[in-house]
Image (cartoon, rainbow, N blue to C red):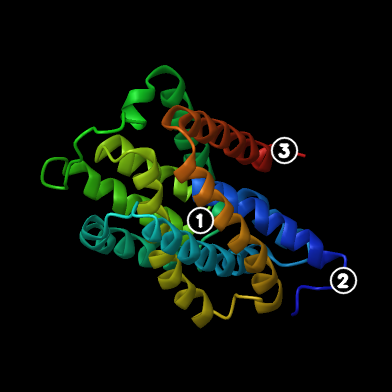
Amino acid sequence: MTGFEGFWQVPLLLAAGLLAGFVNTLAGGGSLLTVPVLMLLGLPAQHANATNRVGVFLHSLVGGEAFDRRGQLDRRAAASLLPLALAGAVAGAVAASRLPAAVFEPVLLAGLALIALTLVWKPQVLAPAEGTPTLGIRERPIAALALFGAGFWGGFLQAGVGIFLLASFSGLLRFDLVRANALKVVMVAAFTGTSLLVFIAADQIVWLPGLVLAAGSVTGARLAVRFAVSTGHETLRRVIFGLVLVALIGAWLKQAPG
């Protein structure tokens, strides 16, 4: 299975990857676009879900490096929190190789709706002001469960995982939105790389479309980091709210009958 039937599919994948890389780096939900595009090319749902991880892994690596180069990545926090997300990702990837995504998709809708409402009515809960002291797992132990759950979701379905991680880092551990985004993309890179191994072992990745998608998404990630670092806090919060809302609508349309 190559995943290609005509050259017209290459620009489609590049464009989808560019948009998804930008969206995923700033918030999350880009997989709600790229997985359907891969399925449009004829990939079965499980293969599309697995193949999508190639682009997510590569653009997250690039985004994490770009945030780090600009001094926005808390390396100590990333190292201490990473094992929780990795453990969840392994469990989620194993579940994804055996269960249909529809089993858990209603959870995606509910979670995205809750985050969108919070950003509107109580923005300070998920978007702390610059200079707010950050917390660790000891001060906020529920964050450990949240990160494991986000890792599981990322390993299982991927779609929307960046938004859930962003909510964990900003809402629970009180990182500002730029530093929370930096931690988020590093986490996504780590556990997506781990889940990729599971999907490779299950022979569910179609490499050619996955790499073309990745080429577009890497460019999108670089543009998103530049935007996140240069824009103001309030503007970034509004953009993230808009992306969460789009992800919510996309998830709802994906599940709508007909």
Of the two numbered discs 1 and 2 on the same chain, state the one appearing first in sequence.
Answer: 2
| Residue placed most toward the observer, 34 or 216 | 216
State left or right for residue 255 relative to residue 196: right
Asked whether residue 224 appears in the rendered view, the answer is yes
Residue 163 versus residue 40 in the image, above or below? above
Of the two numbered discs 3 and 1 on the same chain, state the one appearing first in sequence.
Answer: 1
For marks 3 and 1, give the CA distance.
Answer: 22 Å
Residue topped by disc 3: 257
Q: Position of residue 46 (x, y in %)?
A: 61, 65
Q: Position of residue 65 (x, y in %)?
A: 42, 64
| Residue placed most toward the observer, 228 or 111 | 228
Q: Residue furthest top?
A: 121
Q: Position of residue 115 (x, y in %)?
A: 44, 31
Q: Residue furthest left?
A: 138
Q: Amino acid at mark 1?
A: Gln
Residue drawn at the location 82% of the way across and 65% of the way down = 9
Residue topped by disc 2: 7
- Mark nearest the camera among 1 and 2 is 2
User: Dots 2 and 3: beta carbons under 8 Å?
Assistant: no
| Label 3 residue SS | loop
Q: Amino acid at mark 2?
A: Phe
Q: Quadrant of the C terminus?
A: top right
State left or right for residue 221 relative to residue 88: right
Residue 173 versus residue 30 in the image, above or below? above
Residue topped by disc 1: 158
Q: Residues within 10 Å of mark 2 (few under 14, many from 20)?
A: few
Residue drawn at the location 31% of the way across and 28% of the way down = 129
Q: Amino acid at mark 3?
A: Pro
State left or right for residue 177 relative to residue 78: right
Q: Quadrant of the N terminus?
A: bottom right
| Label 2 residue SS | loop
